[in-house]
Image (cartoon, helix red, strand yellow):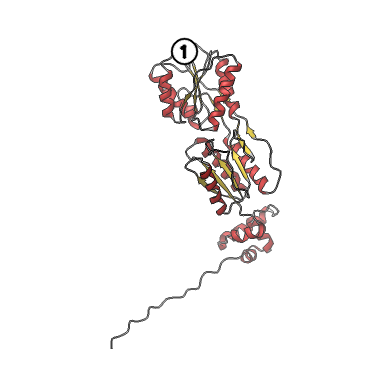
């Protein structure tokens, strides 16, 4: 009979007991109710006591039980965001502001991007967010190709839409796209240019459509001719390609591009053909991206306040989550013209 294998000994180490509010209260020398207030972000705790409780939490490794807290309060302290693109300058700037304001209010963020802005994709993203247990949703989609009908979402969650154009049954916040385009067009006309050519963003973009319509209406109101629109895709490459078709026409003396990237491509096309900016052609962009002041020449552009939009969107959503009055009208944040040296009087 062979020897039996020795039994392998397993050390049954006791599992580390989860730190409780009572442990934190004992270390900080406060009541459990005070610990609860600090954990839930309440403001009715004096700063010294709050700091002491936070120090005890950090030392003990205490983590609030968010699931239990949600059951008690009916809140998950989480906001969902549905986005069409993370590459858009405006979307990323707005998302940054949304995240900052949400964090200040004690809310986490769950972001879902959709491949296309169809009704089914957006509704599917909304349902996935509901599964993630969020208290409300911010929608950052700048396209109006949402299927055959306007954007319709399942009921049950507060929603705020960042978009100035569509007629949604939800609170809407955005930059004033039409105001910015009007300011850009009027600026060029006031410099003595007979008319203003326009490089538009994609046709499916609400923002591009708002800017194009405002450009058109401003020219008509001032009695100027309305040139054909050139449609780009927001990239510098499209601005360059379209710019090469414009530079051959010497009657073109002023161009309003619907974003700064396309304006950059246009500047390259003008430089390559020897048409001076602004002596021969004035150029105005849109967005006031950080690098716009370092284009050559520095770009006259329309400044959008994405931070204000993100802040207003989150505040409107939190008001709705708290059961407060929902604004019936769109909240439009004013845009402004930033004049640099890419625009000048008609020579």
User: Up-down: is 85 above or below 291?
Assistant: below
SS state under label 1:
loop
In the rendered image, which quarter contains the N terminus?
bottom left
Q: Residue furthest front?
A: 148
Residue occupied by mark 1: 251
Quadrant hosting residue 151: top right
Residue at point 37%, 81% (across, down): 7
Query: Is residue 141 placed above or below 107 in the rendered structure?
Result: above
Q: Is residue 125 above or below residue 182?
A: below
The image shows residue 64 at horizontal and vertical percentages of 59, 60
Disc 1: CA contacts within 10 A as few (<14), some (14-19) or many (>=20)? few
Judge whether residue 67 can be spotted in this image.
yes
Query: Residue most toward the bottom?
Result: 1
Q: Position of residue 75 (x, y in %)?
A: 64, 54
Q: Is residue 15 left or right of residue 23?
A: left
Q: Position of residue 171 (x, y in %)?
A: 64, 40
Q: Residue at x 49, y 43 (%)?
A: 114
Front position in the image: 97 or 266: 266
Q: Nearer the viewer, residue 155 or 98?
A: 155
Please, is residue 175 above or below residue 189 in the view? below
């Amino acid at each position: 009979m062979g020897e039996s294998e020795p039994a392998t000994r397993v050390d049954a180490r006791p599992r580390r007991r989860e730190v409780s509010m009572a442990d934190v209260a004992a270390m900080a020398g406060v009541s459990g109710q005070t610990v609860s207030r600090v954990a839930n972000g309440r403001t009715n705790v004096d700063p010294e006591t709050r700091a002491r409780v936070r120090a005890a939490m950090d030392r003990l490794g205490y983590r609030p039980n968010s699931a239990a807290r949600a059951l008690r309060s009916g809140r998950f302290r989480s906001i969902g965001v549905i986005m069409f693109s993370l590459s858009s300058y405006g979307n990323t700037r707005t998302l940054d502001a949304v995240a900052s304001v949400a964090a200040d209010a004690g809310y986490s963020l769950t972001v879902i991007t959709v491949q296309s802005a169809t009704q089914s994709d957006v509704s599917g993203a909304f349902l996935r967010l509901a599964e993630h247990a969020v208290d409300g949703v911010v929608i950052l989609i700048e396209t109006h190709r949402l299927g055959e009908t306007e954007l319709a979402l399942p009921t049950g969650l507060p929603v705020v839409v960042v978009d100035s154009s569509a007629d949604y049954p939800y609170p809407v916040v955005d930059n004033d796209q039409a105001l910015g385009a009007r300011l850009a067009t009027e600026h060029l006309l006031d410099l003595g240019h007979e008319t203003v050519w326009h490089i538009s963003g994609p046709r499916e973009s609400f923002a591009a459509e708002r800017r194009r319509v405002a450009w058109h209406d401003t020219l008509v109101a001032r009695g100027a001719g309305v040139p054909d629109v050139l449609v780009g895709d927001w990239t510098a490459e499209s601005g360059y390609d379209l710019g090469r078709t414009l530079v051959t026409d010497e009657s073109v003396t002023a161009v309003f591009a619907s974003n700064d990237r396309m304006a950059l491509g246009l500047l390259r096309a003008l430089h390559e053909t020897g048409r001076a900016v602004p002596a021969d052609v004035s150029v105005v962009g849109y967005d006031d991206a950080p690098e716009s002041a370092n284009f050559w020449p520095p770009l006259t552009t329309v400044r959008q306040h994405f931070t204000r939009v993100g802040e207003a969107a989150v505040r409107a959503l939190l008001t709705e989550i708290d059961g407060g009055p929902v604004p019936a009208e769109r909240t439009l944040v004013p845009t402004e013209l930033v004049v640099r040296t890419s625009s000048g009087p008609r020579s």
